[in-house]
Amino acid sequence: MPEQIPPVVKLANDFQSDLARGDKYLIKLMARRWAAVGKRLQGEIEKVAREIERLQQAGEPVPPWKIYQMGRYQSLMLQLQGELTRYYEKAIPQIEDAAKKAREQGIEHARLLSRMAAAQAGLPVAQVELAFDRLGVDAAEKIAGLSSWSKPLGELLSRAYPIGASGITNSLITGAALGWNPRKTAREAARGGLSSAFNHILLVSRDQTIRNYREAKRDSYEKSRLIYGYMRVASKSKRTCMACLALDGTIYPVNDSMAIHPQDRCAMIPLIQGAPLPKYEKGLDWFQRQPEAVQRKRMGPKKWESWQEGDFHLDKLVTITHHPVWGA
């Protein structure tokens, strides 16, 4: 028999899906521009690889320190820095715009979820509407100041440079050690070596969007004065991590920000005074009735076997512990 999901939980998950769709659109734009960065750098990487090949063919050893000292290598690092700077100039306004839209969505979704929760509990919906009308633009303006989360967005993104430089350098060192053709070295460096830098940029972008959305929601709940807390609800999709499944159903006070990670898609269900808690199948209960193959893939073979042998409980998989939680 399929699980009966409370309407407020379903709506919250639908809102999370809306947020994810907007995120995918931004990622697509950023990925297209990143591909052009890799293409422009590939030619310069190949020049460095060819110089390494020339030295090797002349019988000279090419240890890592010699690569670092090459003029072409140093020029490549300067070009990488320039390419990333230009990339940030276009990415930052797009990320900030996505964060702004996420804040606006968070405020509106908080209102709609609170309204539904009140209606389900038989409480006056008009009271919820009045409480949220009082928020006005105050909430949006307050949350706008949190978009960079105490660090300028440019500073957060700039960490992609050492990651990208390390990736390219490692590809050059590997190519030299294995005798790769310079074109292969350049191709591997541009695609694989730079991928970690792009992943960092994506994580920063997602973190900005999700945190702004969540904090706008939480702030709206707190200011409404009708909501005493919120319940964390995991999506239970194939990408939901074990920590999120273990925390599914946790209750937080409205003045406490929910601990998250950049890939986290958990929803926040408002808890209204006088209304019963939403009842649904919690993450760990859902996980325990999944087929063995699904459980093994999520946990990894070693952890799964340890769990089966009773060496630890599933809730020990939670690694996010620095935010206090209460209720249940």
Image (cartoon, rainbow, N blue to C red):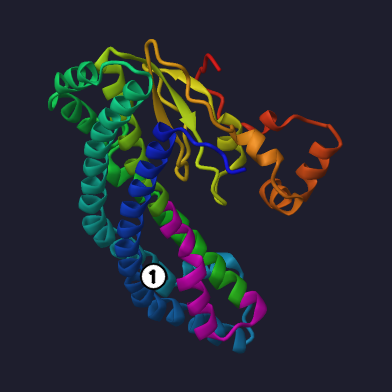
Residue 210's place in the image compared with 45, above or below, is: above
Is residue 66 in view?
A: yes
Q: Name the residue under label 1.
A: 76
Quarter of the image that includes the C terminus: top right
The verdict on residue 288 being magenta is no
Quarter of the image that includes the N terminus: top right
- Graded by Cα atoms within 10 Å as few (under 14), some (14 to 19) or many (20 or more), the crowding at tag 1 reads many
> Looking at numbered disc 1 in the image, what kind of residue is underneath it?
Leu
> Is 180 on the left-hand or right-hand side of 290?
left
Is residue 62 in view?
A: no
Q: How many labels does the image show?
A: 1
In front here: 247 or 273? 273
Q: Give the range drawn in magenta.
A: 176-200
Q: Which residue is drawn at 36% across and 71% down?
A: 35
Instruction: Residue 257 in the image: state x and y as whole percent.
Output: 40, 24
By secondary structure, the bulk of the magenta-drawn segment is best described as helix
Q: Residue at x 38, y 72 (%)?
A: 38
Question: For residue 133, what is the image quadrant?
Answer: top left
Question: For residue 227, what is the image quadrant?
Answer: top left
In front here: 103 or 63? 103
